[in-house]
């Protein structure tokens, strides 16, 4: 069989397999797979370099299905490559199968989960940055994009960043099948509408008939030969191609098609492709350069955001695998300290938080440990990316600065007040919230070892140093700063200092307050909280929902002795003002804490 | 004074006021205001049509500062227009002042809060859609954009949608001052990099010197005269323009400059501009066309997502102010039923959830009641927009479909499992989660009356109808479906049916279980929960954090008699499978509920 014949036959095989798997499952997206089958066939047979036995090798090309719903096509490719067999193929979408409805790293050859559209290309930018700038290996990232998902702004963040970083190792294959889920896209088959826009961003663009395997091969060669900029293959395709009953018809998105399609497609094939392996090794690593960890003097003052930057720079000296990304606020988050210490491992992502998190997900595929930073308020911009990073089983570290009303004059748009809730509700996440510089440094060091999504919340203002340099702050722990049996005050971050002041005031009145610094918001130190007595006041610079207070409530929910818990939190929309004014207005300052504790002790004694 | 002289002087006045206000406050963004001062001066004096006494009139032009940090410029404009006086101007950033660090609708002439970059232009798209397609009035939306924020993908969603909808009543003014917060933008003063990209999207683009008032005036005229497409004025400007010490210097973002700048700028001025008022009235309204509310028969089955679509269509018949937007999944969310009933009030937003929510925020400025829908999982894409919508005091309704593991085979990327946590943690939000069709219809009707952000969570599967059509479901209420004093099962949505089955099983064993349908997750029916006895099992198709379980815990946290609460929720990453398999695997099906209840009754009796 000639190459061209092989490609054509393989395309038909991929279509047949898409039909078979989804017919067996009774659901899935065969028509979206059929449009891209020829694009995928030529890629696998003639261009893709990948060692299926070493999926994590940085030398590998990467293939990311940004249009994750074309999962039948992904699994068909894996069968053609010999990675999975016929029996496993037919388990598609069954409970317990590795072949999920949308691809996830449950399968070792799927680097990242896709299925939330508009994420594969930005992740590909991260993978390409890792290959070109970190590992410096001749790998290529291939991203198969749907035309519908080009409406996601995140795709255009990726396109702009890829051009800026001159990622000539990135190829976007846009499967322009004209039809979205519920009808035609904005641009239909107007290929030029895509070409014009990617070219305006500085990309090369190649328009082709996405069912002509020779044109596809030439386009991939052209993309491979393009230097200094990424290339997009803009392919006109037909949704449902190969089965006349559904070809280019609306109403067939996400629906299994009848087995009779197999016949029209020429029957089941069993072509096995020997996928080329990459040449060369894993490329560059960074040797530890030595670390001087920051040590803050007791009773001095430093902002935890600054300690983050200083600790991250130290961590980067200690570990060559640590990289940092920031969303154009590195002089506020203090990621700039890392940038200055380790410029080759720092990536400016400009004001594009989705791209920032996606790039981190792309980099961690081959083992880099990315730390992303921006204001806590703006990290929420990337929430869907963080959610999907968890589905990807990705290990990514996030730092949100400028948390809460304590930022002061800038006002509510800049105050992260929902970040604890949002990032607690991410599967397998760790949520940390230090109050002082030494604690921050220790937690940054802890973060390096955490699998999954780890989120660190930092504060704008300088805060007093209350812990010794070198004190240990294990994830899941807490610090009891003051002992007292009348009432327990549970605080974290900026409110620790308010709680300490409140405890002083209460002590003057003869009320002994325990103060717990719950720096590990998730997992929280349930054992300590359950032993904290029958009256608890929690206080947080965050909305009342989903943050520290509810984390404490969850920890004591089914204890034998359930404490009475009063949760102090921000409940009205803050305005601008001085930090102290805003803490007072929100009812989370020392006075408010003391008053809540006083009332609790009084009422509970009466009850 | 000639027009040109006036414009120049007004530009200097705006600079002086920016310097004065931020010097007085000791913080703020004067340099970012100074770059755009001439652009703003010519706009106010010669192009903007606005009635300061009727800020909500649909006939008004809209001025949106997408670069919200240029708030000193906003307030300088208001002083020049006579809306605020010198004394109020100088309260900038003080506690209690309406002149917040970033603009918010605390001031009646600020339509929407900005300050999270990349949001003003997408909101402007909504305002322009309202003007052109709903009210059909000759208003114009002017959006002043920073060059840094052009890196946000949401800006490009806006640019694509504005072209698609031929919004020739929208003008974007891009203030290309070259400098972001921490250094140069990706494109510096390469105006063509912006022009090329907006033109590639089908916009007109006009490059000018942003400090030449005659060029500015001509550009605005050209924009006003452009038909069939939006226009962008791409203006080369100098950050800190007018004060030589900071002009075009890095390191001056977000910093007050010395009062000495006032002298170099020629001193304080008191020019008062009579802003032109718009002609014409509020434009088109839609008369109620009559509504046939859906009524589902007891024991029939219907998906709550379908009931959402049918109820929304009915609501649209009852109220002419209801509009709907969907993110290219209207055949899944069933927003298509509204589209077919009220095509003039339906807006397809394609796969661009940020633009969808932003457009809704833009439309509600003049009183439209927008309902947005997409999968619950994908609504998280717009989380920062929802957060900011709350700061905007916007009234927007959101519907997230396909919640939880119960969607089945599509797998975790499509499962909304964090939406309750995310949307509970939005200031002033309402979170509703119906289980059956009649309840859904009632809650859609309730939503129309809710101020602020209201979120409705719907389910993919058909579920049994258990309530009568016409039953009332007030916000903040609950329904006790089964009485029983041994244990209380609190469920919502899909888990209501599992809880009912569990109660049946428990009854067979002699355990009397109360079943509460907590359809109003926020505000939750605290009174009923506090009276629900000493043993509670909560069960939700959602992560354990921030959802129904923690809402219940918060409601009973400081009750005199605190129940022991066991929270059942999704705790492991789900896979693909049949809905029943996944509910069982997550430990939230009837068997798991019954077992938890059994154990609680047994252990608590022992304790």
Image (cartoon, coloured by chain):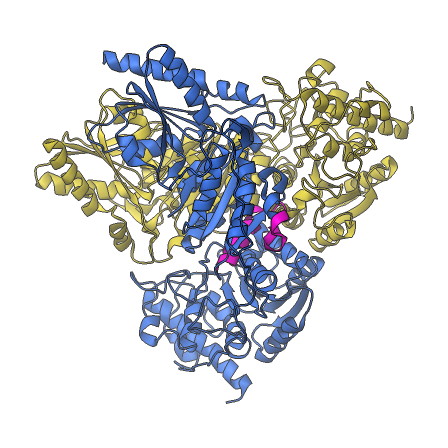
Chain colours: A yellow, B blue
Which residue is at the front of the view, B529 or A49?
Answer: B529
Left or right: B36 as drawn, with respect to A400: right
Is residue A205 found inside the magenta-colored segment of the image? no
The span shown in magenta is B340-365
Residue at point 81%, 42% (across, down): A222
Residue at point 48%, 75% (across, down): B242
Left or right: A87 as drawn, with respect to A292: right
Asked where in the image residue A243 lies, by quadrant, the reply is top right
Is residue B551 shown to the viewer in this render? Answer: yes
Residue farthest toward the right in the current orientation of the protein = A2
When the figure is inspected, residue B541 is found, relative to residue A333, above or below; the finding is above
Residue farthest toward the bottom in the current orientation of the protein = B1
Quadrant, the C terminus of chain B: top left
Asked where in the image residue A52 lies, by quadrant, the reply is top right
Whole-percent x, y for residue B352 in the image = 60, 47
Is residue B361 found inside the magenta-colored segment of the image? yes
Q: Magenta region's main secondary structure? A: helix
Is residue A289 shown to the viewer in this render? Answer: no
Which residue is at the front of the view, A374 or A559?
Answer: A559
Which residue is at the front of the view, A249 or B253?
Answer: A249
| Number of marks drawn | 0
Whole-percent x, y for residue B493 in the image = 46, 31
Whole-percent x, y for residue B396 in the image = 47, 51
Asked where in the image residue A126 lies, by quadrant, the reply is top right
When the figure is inspected, residue A483 is found, relative to residue B598, above or below; the finding is below
Whole-percent x, y for residue B200 in the image = 71, 58
């Amino acid at each position: 069989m000639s190459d061209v014949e092989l490609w054509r036959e393989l395309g038909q095989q991929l279509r047949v397999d898409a039909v078979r798997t989804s017919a067996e499952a009774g659901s899935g997206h065969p028509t979206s797979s059929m449009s891209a089958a020829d694009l995928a066939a030529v890629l696998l047979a003639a261009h893709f370099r990948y060692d299926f036995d070493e999926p994590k090798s940085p030398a590998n090309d990467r293939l990311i299905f940004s249009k994750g719903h074309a999962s039948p096509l992904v699994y068909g490719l894996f069968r053609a490559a010999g990675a999975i067999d016929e029996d496993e193929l037919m388990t598609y979408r069954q409970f317990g199968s590795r072949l999920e409805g949308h691809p996830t790293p449950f399968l070792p050859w799927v680097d990242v989960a896709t299925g939330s559209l508009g994420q594969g290309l930005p992740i590909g930018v991260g993978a390409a940055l890792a290959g070109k700038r970190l590992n410096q290996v001749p790998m290529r990232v291939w991203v198969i994009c749907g035309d519908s998902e080009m409406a996601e702004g995140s795709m255009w963040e990726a396109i702009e960043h890829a051009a800026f970083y001159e990622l000539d190792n990135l190829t976007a294959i846009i499967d322009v099948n004209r039809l979205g889920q519920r009808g035609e896209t904005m641009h239909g088959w107007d290929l030029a509408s895509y070409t014009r826009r990617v070219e305006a961003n500085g990309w090369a663009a190649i328009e082709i008939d996405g069912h002509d395997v020779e044109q596809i091969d030439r386009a991939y060669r052209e993309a491979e030969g393009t230097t200094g900029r990424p290339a997009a293959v803009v392919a006109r395709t037909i949704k449902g191609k190969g089965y006349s009953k559904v070809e280019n018809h609306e109403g067939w998105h996400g629906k299994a098609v009848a087995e009779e399609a197999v016949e029209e497609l020429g029957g089941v094939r069993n072509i096995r492709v020997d996928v080329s392996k990459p040449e060369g090794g894993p490329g560059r690593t960074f040797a530890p350069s030595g670390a001087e960890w920051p040590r803050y003097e007791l009773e001095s003052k430093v902002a935890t955001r600054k300690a983050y930057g200083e600790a991250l720079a130290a961590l980067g000296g200690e570990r060559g695998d640590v990289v940092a990304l920031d969303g154009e606020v590195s002089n506020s988050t203090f990621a700039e300290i890392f940038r200055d210490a380790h410029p080759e491992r720092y990536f400016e992502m400009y004001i594009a938080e989705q791209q920032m998190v996606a790039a981190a997900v792309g980099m961690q595929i081959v083992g880099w440990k990315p730390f992303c930073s921006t204001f806590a308020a703006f990290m929420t911009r990337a929430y869907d990316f963080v959610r999907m990073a968890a589905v990807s089983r990705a290990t990514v570290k996030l730092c949100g600065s400028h948390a809460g009303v304590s930022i002061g004059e800038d006002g509510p748009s800049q105050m992260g007040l929902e970040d604890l809730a949002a990032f607690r509700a991410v599967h397998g996440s760790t949520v940390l919230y230090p109050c002082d510089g030494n604690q921050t440094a220790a937690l940054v060091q802890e973060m390096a070892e955490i699998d999954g999504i780890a989120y660190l919340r930092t504060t704008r203002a300088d805060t007093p140093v209350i812990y010794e340099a070198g004190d240990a702050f294990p994830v899941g722990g807490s610090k009891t700063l003051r002992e007292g049996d009348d009432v327990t005050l549970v605080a974290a971050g900026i409110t620790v200092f308010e709680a300490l002041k409140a405890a002083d005031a209460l002590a003057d009145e003869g009320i002994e307050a325990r103060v717990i610094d719950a720096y590990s918001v998730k997992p929280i130190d349930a054992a300590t909280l359950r032993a904290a007595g029958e009256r608890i006041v929690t206080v947080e610079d965050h909305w009342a929902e989903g943050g520290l207070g509810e984390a404490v409530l969850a920890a004591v929910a089914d204890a034998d002795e359930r404490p009475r818990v009063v949760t102090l939190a921000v409940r009205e929309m803050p305005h601008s003002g001085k930090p102290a004014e805003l803490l007072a207005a929100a009812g989370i300052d020392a006075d408010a804490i003391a008053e809540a504790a006083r009332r609790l002790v009084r009422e509970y004694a009466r009850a």
